[in-house]
Amino acid sequence: MATTIAISGKGGTGKTTVSAMIIRFLLSRGGRSAILAVDADPNSCLGLTLGVQPVNTVAEIREQARTKPPDNTGMDRVRSVEYGIQQAITEARGFDLLTMGRPEGPGCYCAVNNMLRKFLNDLSSQYKYAIIDNEAGMEHLSRRTTNNVDLLCIVAEPTALGEVTARRISGLAGQLPISVKEIGIIWNKAGGATSDEPQLDEIETFGLVPSDPSVSDASMQGKTIFDLDENSPAFLAVSKMLENKLS
């Protein structure tokens, strides 16, 4: 079974960039196609940050399966979902990308979500790591399309609003109908000093990522996470955090 790392955070905190940095760090450890990257944010920016264009989304597959008339056995729908997910996987160098797409529309998706849960769980077992870039509300996880999370990383800025958001997301995580082994905060865009790190007694701090102009410059120039210098202070901080958590 894959080690599952889920990343959540309010928009604009650098959540997707941190997710991409985690993937780049894990790739540096070696292992071809050992990583499944799941873009579970409706904004679907993870592929762009990784330099990969998704071929399809799970949302489109789900909608097609929901509206397709089933046969007497229902097997057409099951096979359609399974085949659709396989076709939606975008292969890249060392990792595969699966994009979830927009949230559910009106109507009942329960049966299709049950099939998705089974197929996604089976799919993640084929990888060493599954990295899930979530939105702040963690709808993907709340629908149990993933059964277990080893690390839930809450990305927040070290501000009063960031503290409130981190507490809210941590509270949501406690209500998820899945197993979450560890929950912690990654304080992003900090000044770099230890004093910049807020102290929340009820939530562990996984790491402090300093403000890094090279990250924003790369984004402004349309570059990917792999164009970032390996000595980038932000990337080094994320790498150190993962070395501590995965050792």
Image (cartoon, rainbow, N blue to C red):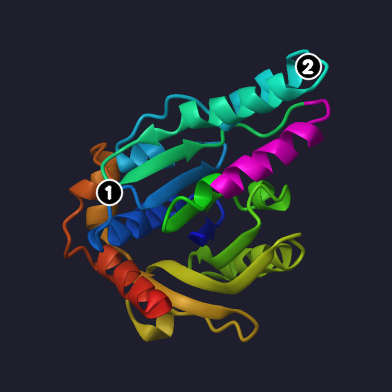
The residue shown at (42%, 40%) is 97
Residues in magenta, as a range? 106-122
- The answer, for residue 240, to whether it is visible in the render is yes
Residue 94, horizontal then vertical, whole percent: 28, 47
Q: Which of 125 and 51 is in front in this view?
A: 125
Q: Which mark is on residue 225?
A: 1
Q: Is residue 154 magenta?
A: no
The residue shown at (46%, 70%) is 187
Q: Earlier in the sequence, mark 1 or mark 2?
A: 2
What main secondary structure does the magenta stretch of the protein show? helix
* Drawn side of residue 164 relative to residue 153, left or right: right
The residue shown at (68%, 28%) is 78
* Drawn side of residue 152 relative to residue 96, left or right: right
Residue type at numbered disc 2 = Pro
Q: In this view, does 78 lie above or below 238?
A: above
Q: Is residue 65 above or below residue 128?
A: above
Which element is circle 1 on? helix
Residue 1, horizontal then vertical, whole percent: 52, 60
- Dot 2, crowdedness within 10 Å: few (<14), some or many (≥20)? few
Q: Which of 118 and 151 is in front in this view?
A: 118
Residue 198, horizontal then vertical, whole percent: 51, 80
- Dot 1, crowdedness within 10 Å: few (<14), some or many (≥20)? many
Q: Name the residue under label 2.
A: 70
Q: Do labels 1 and 2 touch, CB within 8 Å?
A: no
